[in-house]
Amino acid sequence: MPRDGTQTRTKILDTAEAMILDQGYSATSIDKVIDAVGVTKGTFFYHFENKAALARTLVDRYAAADLSMQREFRARAEKLARDPVQRVLVFIGLYEEMMEGLTDPYPGCLFASYLYEANLFDDGIMAVIEDTYLDWRRELGAMLDAAAAAHPPKLPVDTADLADMFTAIIEGAFIMSKTLKEPKLVAAQLGLYRDFVELLFGGERG
């Protein structure tokens, strides 16, 4: 019976992602990845045609995991809160709670790592990143639209911009957390964002 290569493939992906987050894509060579994983070049090329194929698989996997968690947390927020503002606060709070559990600085965002070296990637990879960010704008924006309809904001606000703010805070907090070696920084920034949304819509903390 042929051996299942799923574990090896996953280990290659996990190792490559960690190396890219740590040192960047251009510095992460195939040789470095196979040395770290402990496999042969033949094994690597059995799973991935080349480095570009590895890069595409990594970004597809990262985007899928990101959106899966977003949908899971939205579903939980809908179950835990009836009021639209409360749903948004719960949604943000779930991310805050997850980040509070960090004991080491968050390793970073693969999207950001790719964007720092965008000239090395094709349009397909860039489209994955763009589509994911637009999905966040659309889905969180819809939650914020519902909140605004139920509780008009105290100040004029574009809900798409407010949704983008969530992404911008997380991306910036990842960089600061890694730079300052402060694991709790991401959760703290998300907490401030949650406070801002609560004050903006005049809801009560849940």
Image (spheres, grey):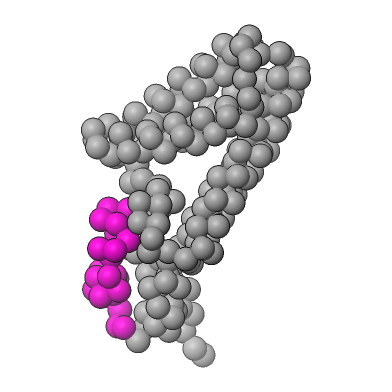
Q: Pick whichever, 149 or 89, lies toward us.
A: 149
Q: Quadrant of residue 156?
A: top right
- 146 shown above or below 63: above
Residue 149, placed above or below residue 56: above
Outermost residue toward the front?
119
Question: Magenta span has 25?
Answer: yes
Q: Residue 186 in the image: state x and y as whole percent.
A: 39, 31
Q: For the C terminus, which image quadrant?
A: top right
Q: Is residue 194 visible?
A: yes
Q: Which residue does the image show at 37% across and 69% down from the upper left?
A: 12
Where residue 202 sits: x, y (%)?
Answer: 63, 9
Q: Residue at x 45, y 20 (%)?
A: 192
Span shown in magenta:
18-41
Q: Is residue 46 magenta?
A: no
Q: Is residue 80 left or right of residue 6?
A: right
**Is 108 drawn above or below residue 205 in the view shown?**
below
Instruction: Find residue 150 and report its horizontal and vertical position in percent.
Output: 75, 17
Q: Is residue 47 above or below residue 188?
A: below
Q: Is residue 20 visible?
A: no
* Principal secondary structure, stretch drawn in magenta: helix
- Horizontal side of 44 relative to 127 (left or right) equals left
At 60% across and 44% down in the image, what residue appears?
Answer: 134
Answer with left or right where residue 33 lies relative to residue 79: left
> In the displayed structure, does residue 20 sit left or right of residue 195?
left
Residue drawn at the location 47% of the way across and 66% of the way down:
122
In this orientation, which residue lies closer to the viewer: 192 or 50?
50
